[in-house]
Image: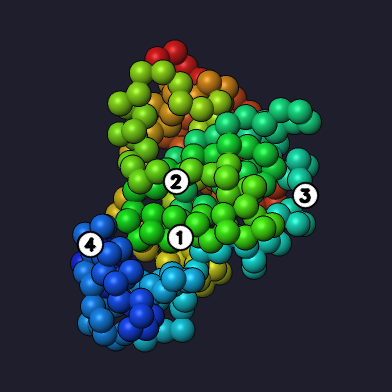
């Protein structure tokens, strides 16, 4: 699979008034900056004060992470509350909201759902572009009346989860949630464009082979691994229990001693 590295991405301002902000972000994350809206790189991150958009050149593909409307708003309003499979897998119950470390945050939408249900969630992501988009989306959500309280339960951390957990000597959360990249699909056209781009961003950064093992040592109550319904087990390890929906399976692993 083709993947995107930092040399293929340019930070560009949406307008001249956004130049300082775009340049600051580029410097902070060691990414290329160009005042030109049509840089030579195949991917660009278009920056304005209100929106950060990931674009693929020569295509209409535009990705914006936004917790105040669209997909996130729909899941918040109609996702099913505590009855949805994600909530059951994490262990949410009436009067019980575990704190969660999402070790593969991606666009952060599962983390947003958990935060909307009352969990404190730490989103860990190692790709700079995703971190930029996550932090902007969280800032935006904090300034929005409907999502402000939810966003206050979310913390974004720029780190490699395996390294982060290895450096710890005690449990870091009640639950560690992992959503490793799904196996390649033959019918890739069926995958949403947003997920195709996420796969390209992370294709060369598959989860460390020891991530599940170290996560089980650093979770107080369980590790939850999201998988396609028919996918193999992560690290070929049979889970202690599962929660399933039509297309998705949540494999649940109990902690092990450090």
From the top left corner, tell me how far across and down residue 195 is, in percent: 49, 63
Hey, which residue is sitting farthest top in the picture?
257
Which residue in the protein does label 2 denote? 156
Secondary structure type for disc 3: loop
Separation of marks 1 and 4 at Cα, in angstroms: 16 Å
- Depicted 149 relative to depicted 47: above or below: above
| First in sequence: mark 3 vs mark 1 | 3
The reply to whether residue 98 is in sight is yes
Separation of marks 2 and 1 at Cα, in angstroms: 10 Å
Answer left or right for 78 relative to 136.
Answer: right
Circles 2 and 1: CB atoms closer than 8 Å: no
Q: Which mark is residue 80?
A: 3
From the top left corner, tell me how far across and down residue 123 is, in percent: 47, 44
Secondary structure type for disc 2: strand
| First in sequence: mark 3 vs mark 2 | 3
From the top left corner, tell me how far across and down residue 214 is, in percent: 39, 26
**Front label number (3 vs 1):** 1
Tell me the colour scheme of the image: rainbow
The one of 142 and 227 positioned closer to us in this rendering: 142
Task: Find residue 14 and report its image quarter.
Answer: bottom left
Which residue in the protein does label 4 denote? 27
Residue at coordinates 45% horizontally, 21% vertically from top-left? 171
Residue at coordinates 47% horizontally, 17% vertically from top-left? 256
| First in sequence: mark 2 vs mark 1 | 1
Answer left or right for 250 relative to 155.
Answer: right
Residue at coordinates 57% horizontally, 54% vertically from top-left? 142
Which residue in the protein does label 1 denote? 136
Quadrant for the N terminus, please: bottom left
Separation of marks 3 and 4 at Cα, in angstroms: 42 Å
């Amino acid at each position: 699979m083709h993947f995107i590295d930092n040399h293929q991405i340019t930070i560009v301002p949406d307008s001249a008034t956004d130049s300082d902000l775009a340049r600051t972000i580029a410097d902070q994350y060691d990414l290329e900056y160009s005042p030109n809206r049509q840089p030579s790189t195949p991917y660009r991150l278009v920056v304005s004060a209100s929106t950060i958009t990931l674009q693929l050149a020569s295509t209409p593909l535009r990705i914006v992470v936004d917790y105040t409307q669209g997909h996130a708003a729909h899941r918040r309003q109609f996702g099913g509350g505590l009855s949805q499979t994600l909530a059951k897998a994490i262990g949410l119950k009436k009067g019980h909201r575990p704190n969660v470390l999402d070790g593969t945050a991606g666009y952060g939408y599962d983390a947003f759902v958990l935060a909307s249900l009352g969990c404190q969630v730490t989103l860990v992501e190692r790709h700079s572009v995703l971190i930029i988009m996550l932090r902007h989306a969280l800032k935006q959500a904090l300034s929005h009346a409907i999502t402000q309280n939810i966003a206050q339960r979310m913390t974004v951390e720029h780190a490699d989860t395996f390294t982060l957990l290895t450096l710890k000597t005690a449990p870091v959360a009640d639950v560690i949630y992992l959503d490793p990249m799904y196996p390649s699909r033959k019918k890739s056209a069926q995958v949403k464009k947003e997920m195709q781009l996420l796969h390209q961003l992370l294709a060369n950064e598959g989860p460390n082979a020891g991530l599940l093992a170290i996560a089980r040592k650093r979770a107080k109550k369980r590790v939850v691994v999201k998988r396609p319904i028919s996918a193999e087990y992560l690290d070929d390890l049979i889970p202690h229990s599962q929660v399933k929906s039509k297309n998705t399976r949540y494999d649940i692993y109990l902690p092990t001693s450090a």
